[in-house]
Amino acid sequence: MSGVAGVAARQLAIEAVDRIMSKGAYANIVLAPMLDRSDLDERDRGLVTELVYGTVRNRRACDWLVDRFLYDQVELPVRAALEVGAYQLVFLRQPPHAAVSSTVGAVPKKVRGLVNAVLRRVADDVADGPVDWPDLGTELSYPDWLLQLFIDEHGTDDAVASLRKMNEPPTVTVRADGYVQNEGSQLVTTAVGVSPGDRVLDVCAAPGGKATAMAATGAWVVGADRRRSRCRLVAANAADLGSDVAVVVADGTAPPFRPGGFDKVLVDAPCSGLGTLRRRADARWRVEPETADRLARLQLDLVVASLPMVRDAGEIVYSVCTVTRAETIGVADALTALEPSLEPLPVSLPWRPWGTGGLVLPHDHDTDGMAVFRWRVHR
Ligand SMILES: C[S@@+](CC[C@H](N)C(=O)[O-])C[C@H]1O[C@@H](n2cnc3c(N)ncnc32)[C@H](O)[C@@H]1O
């Protein structure tokens, strides 16, 4: 069996999926060192990455595909192998012979018969025509509550298109200065619209993507973050890019800065991250229904506490890489109820109108989903 092409790649992929799905490891943390320790070539590394992220994203669909042919519970590493096998057959449309034999070759001898039998049944089923999915949640492979939330808040068409887009491997964008940053985040920086000489406070700056981009325009940028370890990332990224960002460890709910000291303040707040599920393959299985509400409260606290730092007629910008209403519009509405003197500023194309701010859904421009709101501060 070890002579079958691609067995080592499948072995690594199965081990990674098992560690992520049954031992709670983070996909982006676990995979890179495993690949580094392997002696796989570039092509096989790409295959492993695709298999791991694809299987983890599509885990619910893959489980349904194999569960129909399982008569008993299987141990978790065996389940991981079946999921990886099903992913290859159904989502990558690999020829059944290659997908099945390489996966069977990657599992211990005692379970080869079982894995072979189940994957052959899946292969036969797919050969008969399109998969007859039991429901949309299984087909798109998201928790039901998450699918329902997207449908309730964005309508079925946009919900399904967003969720489908977040099942694709992410597009990687490299800025002119070499920093890898999703284009959705770049849209936020553009919406903040800093000018040379502006004094800018980035309240939640780590790892520094937006702070370094704003500094590159000639603004004077203070990048703060609550966690010291994350501030180190801002400093390291700024140093790598030759970017001048003053880094400060500070809790944004009690910012230690001079009132009225900034022309613009950006609160790029911690959020449920539901616009970034494409890049964070396992996140959909970790986020909980109450996460958005909990973080919405923190976001409001952060924006309210940041307001005094803005000078008269300066601007405050609130952004998140999620698309839930509780975060985004819920926070913006709560803020303006508390601070009626805030003047909403327009957020123009390519953003969709979203309350007084803007929204991009993942399928709009092939980016992360994001929301941004801007206000002028009048004292
Ligand atoms: C969405 S990330 C910011 C991304 C960053 N603006 C960028 O473009 O690279 C949110 C950040 O908020 C930080 N954070 C969480 N709670 C905070 C608080 N109370 N005060 C300041 N920063 C906080 C987290 O450590 C995290 O780095």
Image (cartoon, grey):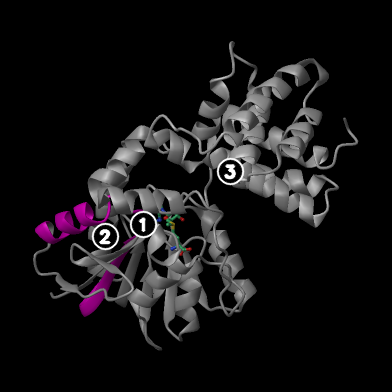
Q: Which residue is disc 1 drawn over? A: 269
**Was residue 311 drawn as part of the magenta stretch in this picture?**
yes
Check the image and name the residue furthest to the right: 3
Tag 1, which secondary structure? loop
Is residue 337 visible in the rendered structure shown here? yes
Label 3 to label 1: alpha-carbon separation:
35 Å
Label 2 to label 3: alpha-carbon separation:
42 Å
Q: Which residue is disc 3 drawn over? A: 91
Q: Amino acid at mark 3?
A: Phe
Q: Residue at x 38, y 77 (%)?
A: 190
Q: Amino acid at mark 1?
A: Ala
**Was residue 115 drawn as part of the magenta stretch in this picture?**
no
Q: Mark 2 near mark 1, Cβ–Cβ under 8 Å?
A: yes
Is residue 325 visible in the rendered structure shown here? no
Magenta range? 310-337
Q: Amino acid at mark 2?
A: Val
Q: Position of residue 28 (x, y in %)?
A: 61, 47
99 and 288: which one is in front? 99
Q: Position of residue 211 (x, y in %)?
A: 46, 71
